[in-house]
Each structure stands twice: as structure tokens, then as C-alpha cells.
Image (cartoon, rainbow, N blue to C red):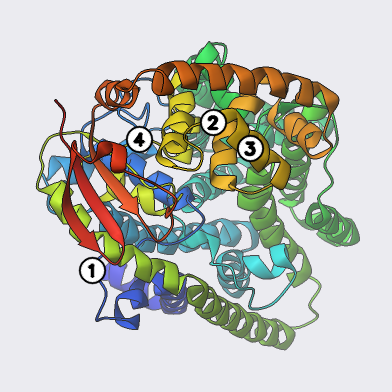
């Protein structure tokens, strides 16, 4: 106990600043209930597009004891998780063990985890930088700048009105904790011959295979870079130990890797790869911040002659280039932005500060730099979070209108399907806050979703649109020509792109350039869809009824404010109104 108190006392500044910055990162979620307390109904999701909504839906699936094959649809949910990630299951295991899954909603759980996770990440980065430098001030400011100053480097601007990315649910704080923890123990392994550090580094690497694809592949690249550097330095003994640590991680993670690549060879795996924007190509990628970090390293090279860590630093710099440019050899382009956002930029910040710090001529310069950067980080975070909060207040207030609907759905303990509105974010409220699934959401493209379901989604929403109902091909062609009705076109583009035979980026490029190959295939596809739609729904009056039954649709949420073109007259005898609030209606479908 005395040791703990002494540690807290000796590191009070780190703890105070880390806790303060964590509060600022989470402030948009903390203050929202007080912005308009009169209308607040307990719906408080951080807005980062719909990524956070997708992560929350996955978490809710775990609380419902489902697998993660499909987090929003009824179909495929107990199939293989295409992400091959066990992060949600591990993080939510305590909630399930304590039996709290029905007492606390997933949003509150994840908001709490975010707070703890961001704080812990700051401590881990500090520990890594302190292991690197043995300088408390440098280590504190490096950890603060990674989290609070990230937007300055990435956006090249102060007070940028985009939420601090570490406020996102699960990623990137979980993946970053794994990465920097691994860096910490691998660095210790390089500095001191200690089997314990070798094993811990290998175990963290092995565990990362089950957490996040971009984490384990980036760590693997760091092993490769370090081993090559050590061999060139003729440090064969150390290179063997590092290689042994690498092998330990590979052995631990091999099961998930084999399963992943086996899944990618299946038809569903190939379909998901398309929607995950996987593509082919050998184009190199240039990183400005990676280049600047290399220049700073080169300037410091001779000064670092007595620094035993300089080769470890060099290997981390090289790692970023390997991760961003692996496609030169593999020919497979991944979503390289994830490497850049979550690893290259943070690592470059830490290493650049480490290298520049040594150039400061005296202690007073270091203290002034520490003070200046600390103030800059907190001002940038506070103003940026404030400006970002203002951009989403209206959307978050609008979400509160769904509370009466969610209450009614929660009163139904059965797992059923809700035909949702076409809004890409509001629809996620249903799988996040209730036990029900929805008929369609964009994240279904990245899960086990049959192509027929994608077709039926297009068919059903077009049928609901009275002006489009009687002629699918005419509606699609006019929309393509006039570039309107984008929420319908997006459903169509999913089918056209998937069936085009091109990867996602190739298809999008051809689409923008009106490539004849795409246009020829388009005519065939539209005619095929129109025939199927006509045969199913226009020639048979009970076609829609059969579709409702097939997908077990029990409820229908109609947001008249956003989907005013819908017409439900054909369902008048089969639906009953359960709720009406601010133009948002909930109907129950009466199966006969």
C-alpha cells in the first residue's frame, strides 16, 4: 500500500494531466445530457459517422450471447465473425459474469470503457517513452501529444472541428494499448537479456491476432524491421531472441490467421473483401510525417552514437514504410489508412519528440517546451472538442425522439426484425438499445449477408416509395441520370459493384469515368433486377407479404421526416400504429 501511495505521489503530474486530458476527450459524451436536459432521453452515442454505431451493435450482440457473424441482421448472426476479433467478447465478459447485461445498456458500458481505456493508453505510452528516454517530462508530453495533439499533425491545423479519434468506441484505444505495450516489452527485451520480457512481448503479439488485424500485422512488420536491422548490425544473439519472441506470437496467433485466410477464400469472404475495400495493385504510398521523422532521425544520427536505442527507433520508423507499402510485393492493397491513422502518426509523434528533445540545449529549454506543448495540447483538445460537439448536437437531439419506440420494442422479449427507416445512423439505435434486429444497415455489407438480402433490400424500399413502385428500371435509370435519390442508388451500387468483377476502388473509378464496361453490364443488371422485382412483387399481390414473412418482419419504423416518399396504403389492413412521436411512427405488422 505504501509503495502504491509513493508511486502515485511520484507520478502525480502524469496522473493529473492524463486524467484531465481523458476528461476532455470524453467531454462531448459527458456534457450532452446537460446541453438540452429537457429533451434528453438517455441516448448518448459518440458520433464518428456510423463506425461507433457498428461497434456498439457488435457489443450488444455479445450481451445477447450471440456470435458476431452479423451484428444488425437476423440472418448469419451466429456464423463466422468476418473481423476475427474477440475484443468485444473479452471486454464484455465481466459484464456477463456479473449478470449486468440487462441492467446497463451497451452505450453506457462502452463510454465507461472508453474513459478507462484512454487514460490507460496515456499511461502505456508514457511507460514506453520513459523506457526509451528515462525522461519524465518528455514521456509525459509525448503521451499527451499522441492523444491530444494528434489532430494538429494529421489535419495540419489547430482546433480542427473533428472529434478526437480516441473518443471512438474500442478502436483505436484498444489496438493502441496492445501496440505500445508490445513496444514497451520488446524494447526492454532489447536492452536487458531477460526471458520474461521476451515472453511477454511474444504473448502480447500473439494476443493481438485475436484483437485487431491492423495491430498484429503492424507488430509483425516491426519484428521484421528490427530483426533485419539487428542482423545488419551483426547482433546475432539479440536477433535470435527477437525472432524467438516473434515465433511465440505467431504460434499463439496461428489458429486465427489460418481461419481468417481460409474464410477469405470462401465466396462470402470474397464478397466481404469487396465491401471492405480490399483491392489489388502495387502503387507505393508516401508518408509525409514518416519522411519528416526519417529526416529528424538522420539529423540526430551522429548525436545518437551512444544511444543504445537508436536502432530500435530506426526499426520503428522503417515499420511504418513497410506497413504502408507491403502491396509493392504482395499486390494486395489493404485499407492502409488504418496503419497511418492508428500507428504511423502516433509512432512518428513519439519518435520525433524523442529525437528533437535531445537537441534542446538546456534544462530550461526543455521545461519551456514542456509547458508550451502541454498548453497547446489542452487548448487544441478543448477547443476542438467544443467545436465538434456543436456539429452533432442537432443529430443527437433528434435521436432522443426514438426513445418511445425503443421502450415499446424492449417490452417485446422476442427476437424479431424491425423494418427500419433508411437513415444510416438512426436505424442502428434499434439493435443497440433493443434485442431486435433490423432489416438493413450498411454494416451488413461487412458481415454474413446473402446477396439476395441485398437485392430484397433494394426491392422493398423501392416498393415502399409510391413514385418508384411500378417501375424499378425507370426509377433507377432516372436516378442515375439525375444523380438523385442517393439512398436508393447506394443500395443499387452495392449490387452493381459486387457483380462488376472489379475491386471496389477500380469499380468506383470506372463509375466516375462512365467506363463503357460498367455501362454495358449496368443495362443487363438493371433489366435482371427489374424482371425479378416485377415477377415477385408486381405480378403477385402477396409478394410483399411473403417477403415480410420470409424475413420475420414484425415491426416497421417510418420516419416521415426523412422518408416522406413512403406509402403504406398497401399495408393498411396488416399494420397497427403503436407509437407516434415527432413524425416518427412505429407500426406492428400483423402476419396472417
The local crowd at label 4, few if under 14, some if 14 to 19, many if 20 or more residues have their Cα within 10 Å, is many
Q: Are marks 3 and 1 in contact (CB under 8 Å)?
A: no
Viewer-side label of 3, 1: 1
Quadrant of residue 351 within the rendered picture: bottom right
Viewer-side label of 3, 2: 2
Where disc 3 sits, the SS reads helix
Viewer-side label of 2, 4: 2
Name the residue that disc number 1 marks: 41
Viewer-side label of 1, 4: 4
Name the residue that disc number 4 marks: 439
Residue found at x 29% / y 73%: 5
- Seen from the viewer's position, the closer of residues 129 and 343 is 343
Earlier residue among tags 1 and 4: 1
Q: What is the quadrant of the C terminus in the image?
A: top left
- Seen from the viewer's position, the closer of residues 262 and 541 is 541
Label 4 and label 3: CA atoms lie apart by 36 Å
- Seen from the viewer's position, the closer of residues 51 and 187 is 51
**Count of numbered tags:** 4
Q: Where residue 512 sits: x, y (%)?
A: 79, 40
Per the rendering, the mark at residue 471 is 2
Earlier residue among tags 1 and 2: 1
Residue 335 visible? The answer is no
Viewer-side label of 4, 3: 4
Where disc 2 sits, the SS reads loop
Name the residue that disc number 3 marks: 218
Where disc 1 sits, the SS reads loop
Label 3 and label 1: CA atoms lie apart by 41 Å
Q: What is the quadrant of the N terminus in the image?
A: bottom left
227 versus 296 height, above or below: above
Q: Where residue 153 sits: x, y (%)?
A: 71, 66
Earlier residue among tags 2 and 4: 4
- Seen from the viewer's position, the closer of residues 224 and 454 is 454
Amino acid at each position: 500500500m505504501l509503495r502504491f501511495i509513493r508511486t502515485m505521489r511520484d507520478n502525480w503530474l502524469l496522473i493529473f494531466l492524463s486524467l484531465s486530458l481523458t476528461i476532455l476527450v470524453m467531454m462531448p459524451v459527458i456534457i450532452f445530457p446537460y446541453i438540452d436536459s429537457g429533451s434528453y432521453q438517455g441516448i448518448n452515442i459518440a458520433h464518428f459517422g456510423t463506425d461507433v454505431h457498428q461497434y456498439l451493435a457488435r457489443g450488444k450482440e455479445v450481451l445477447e450471447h450471440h456470435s458476431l457473424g452479423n451484428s444488425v441482421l437476423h440472418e448469419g448472426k451466429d456464423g463466422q465473425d468476418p473481423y476475427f476479433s474477440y475484443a468485444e467478447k473479452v471486454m464484455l465478459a465481466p459484464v456477463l459474469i456479473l449478470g449486468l447485461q440487462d441492467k446497463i445498456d451497451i452505450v453506457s458500458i462502452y463510454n465507461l470503457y472508453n474513459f478507462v481505456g484512454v487514460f490507460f493508453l496515456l499511461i502505456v505510452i508514457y511507460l514506453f517513452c520513459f523506457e526509451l528516454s528515462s525522461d519524465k517530462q518528455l514521456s509525459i508530453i509525448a503521451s499527451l501529444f499522441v492523444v491530444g495533439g494528434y489532430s494538429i499533425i494529421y489535419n495540419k491545423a489547430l482546433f480542427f472541428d473533428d472529434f478526437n479519434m480516441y473518443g471512438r468506441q474500442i478502436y483505436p484505444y484498444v489496438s493502441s494499448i496492445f501496440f505500445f505495450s508490445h513496444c514497451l516489452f520488446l524494447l526492454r527485451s532489447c536492452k536487458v537479456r531477460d526471458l520474461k520480457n521476451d515472453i511477454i512481448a511474444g504473448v502480447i503479439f500473439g494476443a493481438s491476432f485475436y484483437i485487431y488485424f491492423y495491430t498484429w500485422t503492424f507488430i509483425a512488420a516491426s519484428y521484421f524491421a528490427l530483426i533485419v536491422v539487428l542482423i545488419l548490425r551483426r547482433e546475432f544473439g539479440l536477433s535470435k531472441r527477437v525472432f524467438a519472441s516473434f515465433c511465440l506470437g505467431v504460434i499463439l496467433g496461428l489458429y486465427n490467421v489460418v481461419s481468417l485466410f481460409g474464410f477469405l477464400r470462401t465466396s462470402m469472404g470474397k464478397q466481404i473483401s469487396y465491401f471492405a475495400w480490399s483491392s489489388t495493385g502495387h502503387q507505393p504510398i508516401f508518408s509525409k510525417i514518416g519522411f519528416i521523422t526519417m529526416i529528424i532521425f538522420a539529423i540526430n544520427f551522429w548525436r545518437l552514437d551512444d544511444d543504445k536505442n537508436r536502432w530500435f527507433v530506426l526499426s520503428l520508423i522503417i515499420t511504418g514504410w513497410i506497413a504502408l507499402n507491403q502491396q509493392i510485393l504482395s499486390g494486395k492493397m489493404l485499407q492502409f489508412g488504418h496503419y497511418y491513422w492508428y500507428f504511423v502518426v502516433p509512432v512518428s509523434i513519439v519518435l520525433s519528440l524523442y529525437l528533437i528533445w535531445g537537441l534542446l540545449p538546456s534544462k530550461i529549454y526543455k521545461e519551456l517546451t514542456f509547458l508550451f506543448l502541454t498548453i497547446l495540447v489542452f487548448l487544441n483538445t478543448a477547443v476542438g472538442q467544443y467545436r465538434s460537439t456543436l456539429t452533432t448536437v442537432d443529430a443527437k437531439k433528434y435521436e432522443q425522439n426514438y426513445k418511445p419506440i425503443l421502450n415499446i420494442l424492449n417490452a417485446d422479449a422476442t427476437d424479431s426484425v424491425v423494418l427500419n427507416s433508411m437513415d444510416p445512423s438512426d436505424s442502428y439505435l434499434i439493435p443497440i438499445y433493443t434485442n431486435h434486429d433490423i432489416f438493413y444497415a450498411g454494416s451488413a455489407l461487412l458481415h454474413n449477408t446473402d446477396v439476395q438480402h441485398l437485392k430484397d433490400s433494394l426491392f422493398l424500399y423501392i416498393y415502399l416509395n409510391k413514385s418508384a413502385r411500378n417501375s424499378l428500371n425507370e426509377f433507377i435509370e432516372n436516378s442515375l441520370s439525375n444523380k438523385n435519390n442517393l439512398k436508393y442508388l447506394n443500395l443499387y451500387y452495392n449490387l452493381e459493384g459486387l457483380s462488376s468483377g472489379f475491386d471496389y476502388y477500380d469499380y468506383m473509378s470506372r463509375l466516375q469515368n462512365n467506363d463503357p464496361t460498367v455501362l454495358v453490364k449496368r443495362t443487363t443488371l438493371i433489366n435482371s433486377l427489374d424482371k425479378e422485382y416485377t415477377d415477385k412483387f408486381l405480378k403477385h399481390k402477396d409478394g410483399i407479404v411473403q417477403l415480410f414473412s420470409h424475413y420475420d418482419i414484425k415491426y416497421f419504423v417510418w420516419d416521415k421526416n426523412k422518408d416522406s416518399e413512403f406509402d403504406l396504403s398497401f399495408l393498411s389492413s396488416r399494420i397497427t400504429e403503436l407509437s407516434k412521436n415527432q413524425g416518427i411512427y412505429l407500426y406492428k405488422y400483423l402476419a396472417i
